[in-house]
Image (cartoon, grey):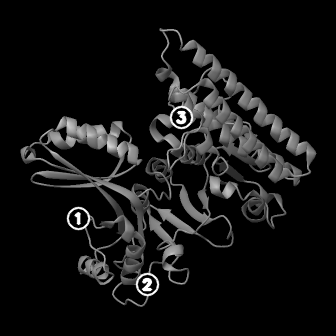
Amino acid sequence: MHTVEKIGGTSMSRFEELMDTILVGKRTVPEELYNRIFVVSAYGGITNYLLEHKKTGEPGVYARFANAESEQAWIDELNKVQARMEEINAELFGEAEFERNAADSFVIERLNDVRDCMKSLHHLCTYGHFQLEEHLMKVREMLASIGEAHSAYNSVLALRKAGINARFVDLTGWHMDQPLPFEEMIKQQFEDVDIASEMLIATGYTHCEEGLMKTFDRGYSEMTFSMIATVTGANEAIIHKEYHLSSADPMLVGTDNVVTIGATNYDVADQLSNLGMEAIHPKAAKGLRRNGVKLRIKNAFEPEHEGTIISQEYHSDAPRVEIIAGRKDVFGIEIFDQEMLGDAAYDIEISKLLAQLKLYVINKDADANSITYYVGGSRKMVNRAARLMEDMYPEGQIRLHNLAIVSAIGSHMKVKGILARTVSALAEAGINVMALHQSIRQVEMQCVVSDEDYEQAVIALHAALIEPRNPSVTSAA
């Protein structure tokens, strides 16, 4: 019986604390130390430098290479990545000369390979028969893999220094002749391991025939985590975050007011994912559900806490709201056109356009002659979408809105009068509800408000729908 455990990038940046909590801590016997496989992400910020900033879109190595800037531009960026990785090595290993030299050598070797490969590709694509665009996804995957390999290799060095029998499981496919199918790659790399006597540290990125980044982009580590858990027959999958899965953001509503969610279901996890607050990617969860692997979300820095169990079967006994969540920086793209009535082509064509621009549609609503898409993405891409929509429908009127979405979410939310209480709570807080969405299944209710009202809306709804002083809805458990 073993567990597969995932550690995110923000937590990895606090590695010394992880050694004292989930990796080693007070564990002294093999039964406690081993029978665990860890899947690690790159250190916080590293993937932003390698690709592009996840939130601001500021270009990293990949973006500078893909945008056909001068060769020196992306080389300079790659040199900055190397300097930052070596800084991390110095912070982690300090005066431990052997480990620090090994960590630096690993980084230098991998980045030299990347540098040579990208230079050769850049030169090759100066010939008319070879187009850079055809190779960009491979370049993106190669760069992304560097961050995970760096953190996994360093973790093994640090664990061995502490006397732990740790093994580096490199799933990046470095120097492999041919990529294997995803599941086969995982099976092959775990064939000869001894889970009972080795602590296995695997890269969050897996090089495979399918190309994980084509479908999941930077969500690939959760797919790796899920596949390892199912292929190796884990009895439990654990995701370690730097916070508990709680009834709301404690920084907004106060630590004394939030409730740690003890149990919920995958339906709730999917709603959180839609808002960009992933407990786990829905497709990663699918494999766990199918194979009966229990999923637990834990706070990496409070190891004694049981965390949150997510299962397919959970359904709260009494109707209630479990979580108030949401996201800022949502753009409402509204198109009004008198010709729209009864013409489904509008929605089909605009949805295709937004997908091509990689704008994530959180929700949408429509009436007889208008559709509004609530999307997440960069302002640059949103403006581009608006211009293209104007070209597509010259008689239409396009308007952009800066918005936020605040959601009440629960596994069983058929609470009488909840809609009225929600609107009243926001009205009493002086917040105008610009749109409201609730499906028949009643697992989520989304309130669209002005971007500047986001924080206050979360506070108001948490106070009205979850906090114990409101007797109409019991607190989440």
Which of disc 1 and disc 2 is earlier in sequence?
A: 1
- Does the rendering let one see residue 7? no
**Left of 178 or right of it: where is 87?**
right
Disc 2 target residue: 467
From the viewer's perspective, is the residue at label 2 or at label 1 nearer? 2
Q: Relative to 446, does residue 102 appear above or below in the rendering?
A: above
Q: Is residue 180 above or below residue 251?
A: above
Residue 341 percent across, percent down from the top left: 7, 47
Residue type at the position of mark 2: Glu
Give residue 130's position: percent from left, percent from top. 50, 12
Looking at the image, residue 257 sits to the left or right of residue 354; the answer is: right
**Residue at image coords 48%, 9%:** 128
Occupied quadrant, residue 434: bottom left
Q: Earlier in the sequence, mark 3 or mark 2?
A: 3
What is the C-alpha distance between the residues marked 3 and 2? 45 Å
Q: How many neighbours does mark 2 have within 10 angstroms: few (below 14), some (14-19), or many (20 or more)?
A: many
Q: Position of residue 103 (x, y in %)?
A: 81, 41
For label 3, the residue is: 63
Task: Give the SS element for disc 1.
Answer: loop
Residue 432 makes an appearance in the image: yes
Mark earlier in primary sequence (1, 3): 3
Do the numbered discs 2 and 1 sit on residues whose CB atoms are within 8 Å? no
Above or below, comparing residue 134 to residue 51 in the picture:
above
* Figure disc tally: 3
Report helix, strand or loop for mark 3.
helix
Dot 2: what SS? loop
Residue type at mark 3? Ala
Tell me the residue that label 1 is attached to: 440
Q: Amino acid at mark 1?
A: Ile
Q: Marks 1 and 3, Cα distance to the nearest angstrom?
A: 42 Å
